Image (cartoon, rainbow, N blue to C red):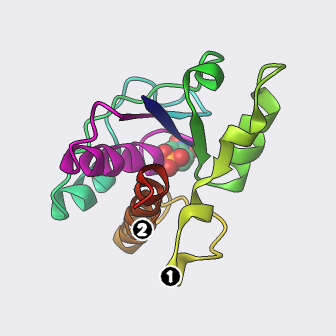
Amino acid sequence: MKKILFVCLGNICRSPAANGVFASMIAGKNLAGAIACDSCGTGDWHIGQLPDARMRAAGARRGYAFSHRARQLRREDYADFDLIFAMDEENFRDLLARAPAGTDTGKIRRFADLCTGKFSGAGFVPDPYYGGEKDFEHALDMIENGCAALLRELTGA
Ligand code: 4NP
C-alpha cells in the first residue's frame, strides 16, 4: 500500500481538493487496495471543518463531493506516509522544518512539480482562499493535472 499525504495551510481549500480528486482517480482505476491518500494543514484554524463552500461548489461542478474534515499535520504523518506533497513553498518549508529527526526528507515534495503542460514550472498551487471563483477553478485545474501525473508515476502508466 502506497500512502500519499497532501498538505496546505488551512486544509479547507487546496489539499482536501487534491485528496478528493486523487481518491476519485484511485477508485476509478480500482486501485483502492494499492494506493491511499489523506490531507492535512500546517495550521490549526479550521480543524474539523468541511472544505470551503467555494471549493466544494467548484468540485461539485466537476462531479466531486469533497467531504474531508480538516486536521492539522501530526508528527506521525512523517512516518505513516510514503509521499508528502506541499501545495506551496510556505507549506514545503514548514514540512521540512517540522520533520522529526531521522525523517527521509526526500519523501517531501512540491505538488506543483508533478504538473505538466501549461502548468509545468508553475512552482506552487496558488492559495484561492482570498480570491474568487476563477482562482478556485485554477487551483482545481492544477490539482487535476498534478494528480493525473502522480497516478501515472505510481502506476508506471
Ligand atoms: P488552503 O487555503 O491552505 O488551501 O486550505 C487557506 C484556507 C484558510 C486560510 C488560508 C488559506 N486562512 O487563513 O484561514
Q: Nearer the viewer, residue 64 or 51?
A: 64
Q: Which residue is mark 1?
A: 117
Could one spot residue 125 in this view of the protein?
no
Q: Amino acid at mark 2?
A: Asn
On screen, residue 92 above or below 115: above
Count how many numbered circles sit on residues in the image: 2
Q: Is residue 30 left or right of residue 26?
A: left
Would you call the spot at circle 1 few (<14 residues within 10 Å), some (14-19), or many (20 or more)?
few
Q: Quick one: label 2 or label 1, which is nearer the N terminus?
A: 1
Q: Is residue 123 left or right of residue 111?
A: right
Proximity of marks 2 and 1: CB atoms separated by less than 8 Å: yes
Q: Residue furthest top?
A: 76
In reply to whether residue 19 is colored magenta, the answer given is yes
Residue 60, x across and y down, in percent: 18, 56
Q: Nearer the viewer, residue 133 or 122?
A: 122
Image quadrant holding the C terminus, namely bottom left
